[in-house]
Image (tube, coloured by chain):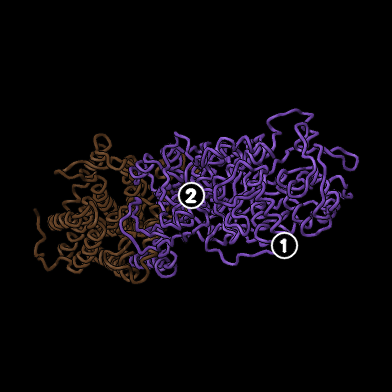
Amino acid sequence: MASYVIVGMVGVLLLGFWKLQVIDSDKYAQWAERNRVRSIPIIAPRGRMLDRDGRVLVDNRPSFSVLLLRDDPALVEKNLPAISEGLNIPMADLREQLSNTRALPKFQPIVVKPEATQADIDYIESHRADIPVLEMLSVSRRRYPPGGFMSHTSGYVGEVSEQQIEASNGKLRPGDFGGKTGLERQYNDMLMGTDGMRRVIVNSVGREVDRLPSQEAIPGKEIRLTIDYDLQQVAEQSLGAREGAVVALDPRTGEVLAMVSHPAPDPNDFAVRVSKEEWKRLNDDEQKPLLDRTIQAQLAPGSVFKIVMATAMYETKVVPENMTVFCPGYGTFYGRQFKCWVFGKSSHGTVDVHRAVNQSCDIFFYTLGMRMGIDIISKYASGLGLGHRTGIDLPSEEPGLVPSEEWVQRVFHRRWYPGETISVAVGQGAVTTTPLQLARLIGGIASGGVFMQPHLWKDAQNITEEKFPLKDSTTEKITDDMYGVVNGGGTGAGLKLQGIEFSGKSGTAQVIGYAARDRVAKQKRFLDNAWFVGYAPKRDPEIVVSVLVQESGKHGGEAAGPVVRDIIKTYYDKKAKKTSGQYTVEYKRYDLGDGSAPPAAIQPQPVLKPEGPSTAAPARAAAAQH
Amino acid sequence: MKDAPGATTRDYDWWLLAILAAICTLGVIEIYSATHGSTLAGMHLKQLRWLGIGIVVMFIVSRIDYHLILGQAPILYLIGIAALIAVLLVGHTRFGAKRWIPVLGEFLQVSELVKLIIIIALARFFAEVGSEELSLRDLIKAGLLVGLPLVLILKQPDLGTALVLVPLLVVGAFLAGLQWQHAAVFSLAGILLVGAVFYPPVSRHILKPYQRERITSFLHPEEDAKGAGYQLLQSKIAVGSGGFWGKGFGNGTQNQLGYIPVRYSDFIMSAWAEEQGFKGVLFALGLYMALLLRLVQNAQRAKDRAGMFLVMGVAAALGFHVLVNVAMVIGAMPVTGIPLPLMSYGGSATLFVFLAIGLVMNVRLRRFVN
């Protein structure tokens, strides 16, 4: 009897072992493996961004993130208070992060603190045994040039959003970094590498005892930009602390040589994790620092639009080229009085088209607009590239607006009032453009109607070439006009550069109409926007620069012109040095500094000394024309 | 010392000793495997020393006529009770329980010795019950005999060792002619008690917090994988991942990386099962089965009822240890802290087994003596 009990007992125990070791063996083998193997991601460094000469614009710096291993929820829960205290993360934040990542597989660790301090690292190291759920992750963080240098164009990276994760087909996980704006976003797939996985064997108290073969990270690709560091720097400094934008293009290729939008936030502040308050502050800021003015500011082009008008005039001959208009400082169109910009100070007298462009006479262009009609204006404005995106390789470009009869019908369900044509003729009214569009416009017109797609990636393929062919006579006449603006005593007379066919057109766009401004008197918010789009040489230019200085209260030639001039001068200085073999690429390594001194890039003084006494002193004074 | 006349070394149960030696060898091998790479390295040597002491003690005990020992049962019993009380008063606390008193520079678990004393006391008590049937009065007496030390051991607290006393009573009573009515009543009482232990509203009043935790973690090991349920789960993972063939000596990851709790002692079967697989388990459990069967055979051949009760008591104690320990290792029972005889590392437990086997040999040597 006792023997049967013993045999039966051993038999039952063996059955128990059979179940575990034979039937369920695979499951437990997996669990044992999961026990001992800990997978820690190796973050692939993002590709660097270089300027056209190979100088580093955006690179990486090493850093540590703190990972929370969530395989064991009970253990995580138990350690939360200690983690909160040790790493200085509020409990509520930790809980929120945990609940946000609930849907993820448990074996995927989450980043609870993206930028570990030395104290955090020490804390984790010394608490390995009692808080086994923390792990250090070596990461590389983005390092941008300081002071917001080129920051709108470079964009910045940040933790990927839920939408981005969903759209990535499992490639992205919460806590991953991806491009949020600018080139970082545009070329994210290229810049972002493929993360690897380090696999280590850990013992029961979480100490690493051995390593398994790791899956190496594949670093992201480096991209070379068309940006010229030297020009970019001059552009940044020359625009200085003023609100505005600079775009420098090579119209022959569409390559962007410099691109500035001020004010510019320092993306190094976002390279880790931007706080809600900081984000709100940036969004609510009246100066709109997050707006990339080069491609997103849709503003009245003002007198720069007169180039579209004059080109249409030369090309269509609907209005005879020899038309002259008498400008007494104002004019009456459709029963309403319109002022010329010289109203109250002087008058232009009798002007032909060449003089009208040079002196930017409004009365001439009101008359021209009235006689030409909105259809032709809008056809030429669109054909020359306004009212639609340029196709630059940046996200969130705005199209601007070219009004037309069809447009008012569609949007406002009404007829076009002929009086509206008068405002549009001088780049006011409903017409809006971005600084990039104006650079492309002027560069394309001076190139005979050939418009290269603006782009920032040097190795970009399939650059489209848009053609709106202009007669050679038209190109000759319009470029003569723009040459005259700078060199023929026009509104940019103070900007002349020795030996360079510097041409261009100024613009002073009202933020609100004259009448409205008269009512509210001169308040800061309603100061004029200053434009200057300049290029060189006169025909088939190598460089075109469009500058916007917002609400400067000064005229285009005066406020924006010198910035254009600085950049074009730098371009030719550098070219001269290159042809004479003097120029070597100097590796300008920016210094992140400690943030106490304002970075050089936003110092308002121009880098370039005026060329000589002949142009220097009178530059500002003489340019105080339109 | 009153020797068994005519008994020679040939009369020892050499088969039993061979089985014992085999089990001890498995134990030492696995203790070595579980500890050689850790701060506990060298533990297998200490275990060998305990085994050596055990063998000597076994031979000494086997030479003292068990009738003489049974004659001193009341005194031994009193000494045992006194020792248990002493432990509660001045005992050494380790792992949160007062179980140890220092003897010759080592800490001995008094309760291990008490187990042996209860085996002796019960053997004498049941042997003296003349009738074929066990009266309720005698049953209650036997119950009290076991109940007093049981309560004292529970006080330490040491649920595991206390529980071992129960099968001693059950097996003894059964052999002494337990009536089926009594068996039914006590079975029911036992079932109610177990039910109460597993039913939280009641167990709250009768169990210590750590005991309740063990019960909970036994019922739901995955819920609390690093608390109390951790041990059971890790043990199951170790056993299961060993598969049929095992991971090989020194290759058990659960064992070597320390995921198995007290892998050199209470959970040594878990470590063995991981490294040697089902085939190893088959071998080890086969040895234990052979050991128990051999003990039963010795009991049947005992010269008198007292000898039979002694050997069956030893068999019941060892059998219970094996059952509860191995069932725990495969997650079929809660963690009770009962070691696996002869494989688990431990001085007191090893000594107990050899003392008990000494009694068995004692009975065997005198089977032909009148």
Residue beneath the point at 82% across and 53% down: A404
Residue beneath the point at 25% across and 47% down: B114
Q: Earlier in the sequence, mark 2 or mark 1?
A: 2
The kind of residue tagged 1 is Leu
Chain B is which colour? brown
Which chain identifier belongs to the purple chain?
Answer: A
Q: Position of residue A576 (x, y in %)?
A: 47, 54
Q: Position of residue A62 (x, y in %)?
A: 40, 49
Depth check: A513 or B219 in front? A513
Residue beneath the point at 58% across and 54% down: A543
Residue at the disc numbered 1: A470
Up-down relation of residue A226 to residue B148 (above or below): below
Which quarter of the image is occupied by the C terminus of chain A?
top right
Residue beneath the point at 90% across and 43% down: A334
Q: Position of residue A90 (x, y in %)?
A: 49, 37
Depth check: A252 or A64 in front? A252
The chain to which mark 2 is attached is: A
Numbered circle sitting on residue A230:
2
Q: Is residue B228 visible?
A: no
Depth check: A128 or A285 in front? A285
Single out the residue that lies furthest toward the right: A335
Depth check: B237 or A125 in front? A125
Which quarter of the image is occupied by the N terminus of chain A?
bottom left
Disc 2 from disc 1: Cα separation: 33 Å
Q: Are marks 2 and 1 in contact (CB under 8 Å)?
A: no
In terms of secondary structure, where does tag 1 sit?
loop
Tell me the quarter of the picture where residue A346 sits.
top right
In terms of secondary structure, where does tag 2 sit?
helix
Discs 2 and 1 lie in a common subunit: yes
Q: Is residue B321 left or right of residue A492?
A: left
